[in-house]
Image (cartoon, coloured by chain):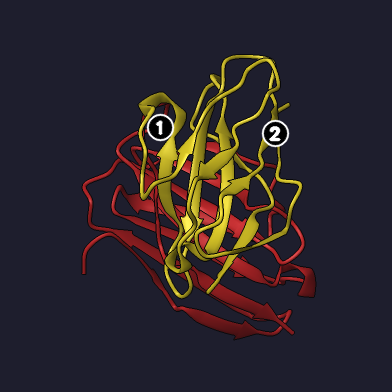
Chain colours: A red, B yellow
Amino acid sequence: ETGVTQTPRHLVMGMTNKKSLKCEQHLGHNAMYWYKQSAKKPLELMFVYNFKEQTENNSVPSRFSPECPNSSHLFLHLHTLQPEDSALYLCASSQETGRGNEQFFGPGTRLTVL
Amino acid sequence: AQRVTQPEKLLSVFKGAPVELKCNYSYSGSPELFWYVQYSRQRLQLLLRHISRESIKGFTADLNKGETSFHLKKPFAQEEDSAMYYCALRGNNAGNMLTFGGGTRLMVKP
């Protein structure tokens, strides 16, 4: 599959569960991003990775733990989440960070925390 | 701090009517402005950016630094333009942080 893929597309979890979201990009990009899209708030940047190194953490709670083993894969590990963490989590990638680099988005994972 | 405001959550127009989706921003430096679109059951995708000065699918947007606005316009709306539209800003700070507005849902009625 081309572009940016995300699995699973839907996830329901309890507050005590541990789960992971996966993102994979087939574009040869070096930068990857996690965004959160809530019903009542604008799309929010969570993390940025450039060449596998985390370059931005937008004050995200520690119950969200990102991992970037290589430039093509990005994970978001979830543990002891709260119901207010229910949202659409979008992954994106770009050639590099910085101005002029278009970000390409995945379809998102719809997360529901019970 | 950078901020993007889209004052209208919903904009409904008839086919063939002009459409303008408003976007205002707050940023002290020299911003890079974008419009993203999300059609039903499709992923978020870039529609246009101000530095390209291009027209995509009949849409244009002009950066007005005096009014700190980047409104999206199309002279004749089509039904297939119905979608969620997000205005986004990237500053000239380190990294590639995009700040998004809350989005405007455009409905084009036949």
Marks 1 and 2 close (CB-CB < 8 Å): no
- A61 in relation to B51, above or below: below
Q: Which quarter of the image is occupied by the N terminus of chain A?
A: bottom left
Crowding near the residue tagged with mark 1, few <14, some 14–19, many ≥20 C-alpha atoms within 10 Å: many
Q: Amino acid at mark 2?
A: Asn
Q: Is residue B58 visible?
A: yes
Crowding near the residue tagged with mark 2, few <14, some 14–19, many ≥20 C-alpha atoms within 10 Å: many
Left or right: A10, with A73 as reference point: right
The residue to which callout 2 is attached is B24
| Chain ID, mark 1 | A
Q: Amino acid at mark 1?
A: Thr
Spatial separation of the CA atoms under disc 1 and disc 2: 24 Å
Q: Which of these two is toward me, B61 or B31?
A: B61
Left or right: B13, with B26 as reference point: left
SS at mark 1 in the image:
loop
Q: Which mark is residue A97?
A: 1
| Chain ID, mark 2 | B
What count of labels does the image hold? 2
Q: Which of these two is toward me, A108 or B19?
A: B19
Q: Where does the image place residue A94, in percent across and percent down from the top left? A: 35, 42
Residue displayed at 63% across by 17% down? B65
Residue B87: which quarter of the image? top right
Residue displayed at 69% across by 54% down? A62
Residue A73: which quarter of the image? bottom left
